[in-house]
Amino acid sequence: MATEIKFGTDGWRGVIAWDFTYENVRRIAQALADYINENAPSEDEGKSSKIFVGYDRRFMSDIFAADIASILRSNKIDVTLSACAVTTPMVSMLTLKKFWLGIMVTASHNPAQYNGVKVKLAGCSAPIRETKEIERNVDENPVLFLYGQKAEQKNLTDLYQKHLSSIANLKKIATLKGNIAVDYMYGSTAGWLEKLLPSNKIVALHEEHDPTFKGLQPDPALKNLADLKKLVLEKKAIAGFAFDGDGDRFGLIDEKGNYVTPCYVAAVLLHHLSKTKKLKGKVVQTVSMGYLPKRIARSLGLSFEEVPVGFKNVAELMGLEEVAFGVEEAGGFAWKGGASDRDGLAVALAWLEILATTKKKVSELCDEVAKEYGSSVYLRRDLPAAKPIDKAAFEDKLRRKLPKKVGTFKLAEVSTLDGVKIYFENDEWLLVRPSGTEPLVRVYAEAATKKDTQLLLDFGEKLVAPYIK
């Protein structure tokens, strides 16, 4: 039986040689070709119908990308194949500047044994309604792969460099004194900060190409940043930046070697961008994100909305409404006048610009936010799922098991927008949900102290005990 191809939180992913195989990549390539031929704008509409195929540094990503491009060519589609490994945000940017649709071969932050395919449209991840159509096209037609149909290859990194230079004040950033520590995590952001800033300011880790990631998961989360913490302290760096395998996620270490949670990264960005960029519109975040952006939006008189996990849900709303700032818990950030899709490099440049403008340290900026909007201790546990989970049944069963209090915290509201999220009276919250990309059950919580956050996490883990190994 053929592998079922389903798009998760962001793209289709699988284990190389198990379900991410030549056969399955070619099946999805033909489905994409059918979707493109049915939906691409015509010449009469005056819009580009060209397609760009990019790839990251993972094992055989370039070969899989070439296969996809050849199948598109065989289906008479105008396609350009990247001549080098690129970031996913670059592919997103190209769908605003030059191409109608972008296809990226990457498994993002997943371990080395994974690979995947993302689809970008109008500057962000293709909405669910589009990926559902692509899924329906799988196996509708036999794969058309004609001999000799190779796509034209181009290096378009100069366009991405111009884009990044246009959304950040590089001259201002160049005035910063001190080292900037960077962990490229063997991903396709490697070398990019050196292109944009004086290279003598950058001290980098893991910039070489290694498809195994030397055993490191290319995810800029706390558990993977021990080397970056050490580098910040050794080099007395002003900050440490980390990027995931395809460059759309961002992690931050302050000058003291402390991990800065996405809650504080988002809060400082929103607080300062609202002043310097005069942001107007809605603040949008995924349901797994913390309460600081909500409090800042409230103080600024901006409307606020939560969406399901996956930055594509934030980006889709940004395309439909006036959104000032969008954020997801997994290290994705975007704002009006800046990045159209989540982009780790754009976030790093924005932070450097804030540091250069305020002449303050990362820890000082976080302390200011905590003083004005309240402290935040945000934690997450990833627990191995015992078996595939029916999400609707999971949400219904857990909701019916909830008590009126957890410790001293009184329930104020419960949402099943994506998993089960419990809001307590003073903005504290707990979320439990099955992952959309990995066989995990995630438990998230946020409170003002670590003790209280741990208490909420412990309750969440007991709640999902029947679903974990």
Image (cartoon, rainbow, N blue to C red):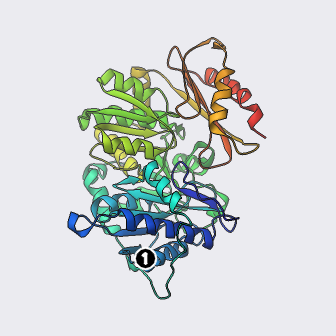
* Amino acid type shown at disc 1: Asn
Query: What residue does disc 1 label?
Result: 75
Tell me the quarter of the picture where residue 297 sits: top left
x and y percent of residue 271 in the render?
A: 34, 31
Is 82 situated above or below 264? below
In-front residue for pair 184/137: 137
Residue at 28 percent of width and 57 percent of height: 165
Question: In this view of the protein, can residue 237 be seen by the observer?
Answer: no
Is 259 situated above or below 341? above
Tell me the quarter of the picture where residue 387 sits: top right
Residue at 66 percent of width and 19 percent of height: 402
x and y percent of residue 256 in the render?
A: 51, 38
x and y percent of residue 23 in the render?
A: 62, 72
In-front residue for pair 86/392: 392
Is 154 situated above or below 122? below
Compared across the picture, whether 127 is left or right of 233 comes to: left
